[in-house]
Image: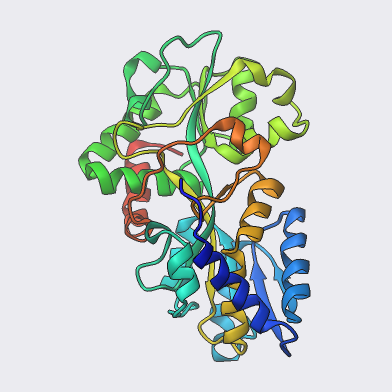
Amino acid sequence: MFKASTALATIVATTLTTAAWAEGEVNLYSSRHYDTDERLYSDFEEATGITINRIEGKADELIARMSAEGANSPADILLTVDTSRLERAKDAGVLQSIDSEVLEARVPAYLQDSDNQWFGFSQRGRVIFYDKNDVANPPRTYLDLADPQYAGKVCIRSSSNTYNQTLLASIIEHHGEEAALAWADGVVANMARAPKGGDTDQLRGLVSGECEIAVGNTYYFARALRKNVKGVSDDIDMIGWIFPSQDAEGAHMNLSGGGVAAHAPNKENAIKFLEYLASDQAQQYFSGGNDEYPAVPGVALSETVAKLGHFKPDDVSLSAVAKNIPTAQKIFDEAGWR
């Protein structure tokens, strides 16, 4: 990771300064449900004079609402979690391409949509956790999870989970459909239990002894380091972690990101808000407030995120990965991954 240049920091600062005392508002449709995001909103309003009006809900519901509202939609911004949902919004025609030198300079190319309809603002590495007491040779790559030596040991979420859908979509992008199906078949054979619950429940499975290996996003584990998470924090020292594929493509990244609505009535203010999310200040909030990795290189990590360490992320275009999601779901179904 590198430090953001002074020039880039100046661009962001200038953007916010020239927006100060701006009249108007921006209408945000958000499926992010984190209380810590309140600081993002209040600081933007204070810096720019632009009022944020929020409508919150589940991603698919918000996308459907924007589609139904059509040209009359008041939405200026869609903010949501995971590449699959961002791509779903693009495919539904509820986002638009934008031009922003700030976003182009700050957000790495692989975290941007190829048509600039969405941008990633925070990352969660999808990593392999393991019981340090029972697993002497943990999987080092995602493909290793299908190795028969781990039969009956793996806890992982269902195939309907967007994080797993984009993970399999990335495997398709790197290794092809045949290898992806073999992987899905192997993971199903290695499952310690039928998929259930969220990422925190996979960590609880390690602690309870239901499984010895689990797959989850980094921020669930970092949260359990920062504060008490029932069924995890008290025994967290028994859990080790692997950033997969460090000698190959790197660790798969899940995104939180957003884009400007197709019929945004306050387009300029919407772009200002997205540019603010790429500022050092906002990036540090993502890390400190919600235990995420910043999207912008060089931004300091929070104390708990830093405990997980730096790693090589998979820099494959997530826009390209998103195109494989329908195929990934077919492969899940064929493998009997429920």
**Residue 29 at what x, y percent from top left?**
65, 72
Which residue is located at x 69 percent, y 25 percent?
Answer: 232
Q: Is residue 36 above or below residue 178?
A: below
- Residue 331 lies left or right of residue 293; in this view the side is left
Q: Does residue 62 appear in the picture of this structure?
A: no
**In the rendered picture of this protein, how many numbered marks are placed on residues?**
0
Quarter holding residue 269: bottom right
Which residue is located at x 32 percent, y 21 percent?
Answer: 147
Q: Does residue 106 appear in the picture of this structure?
A: yes
Q: Residue furthest front?
A: 6
Which residue is located at x 50 percent, y 61 percent?
Answer: 85
- Residue 40 lies left or right of residue 122; in this view the side is right
Q: Nearer the viewer, residue 141 or 69?
A: 141
**Residue 158 at what x, y percent from top left?**
50, 40
What's the coloring here? rainbow
Q: Nearer the viewer, residue 248 or 261?
A: 248
Quarter holding residue 187: top left
Q: Is residue 265 above or below residue 227?
A: below
Q: Is residue 266 above or below residue 239?
A: below
**Residue 315 at what x, y percent from top left?**
36, 49
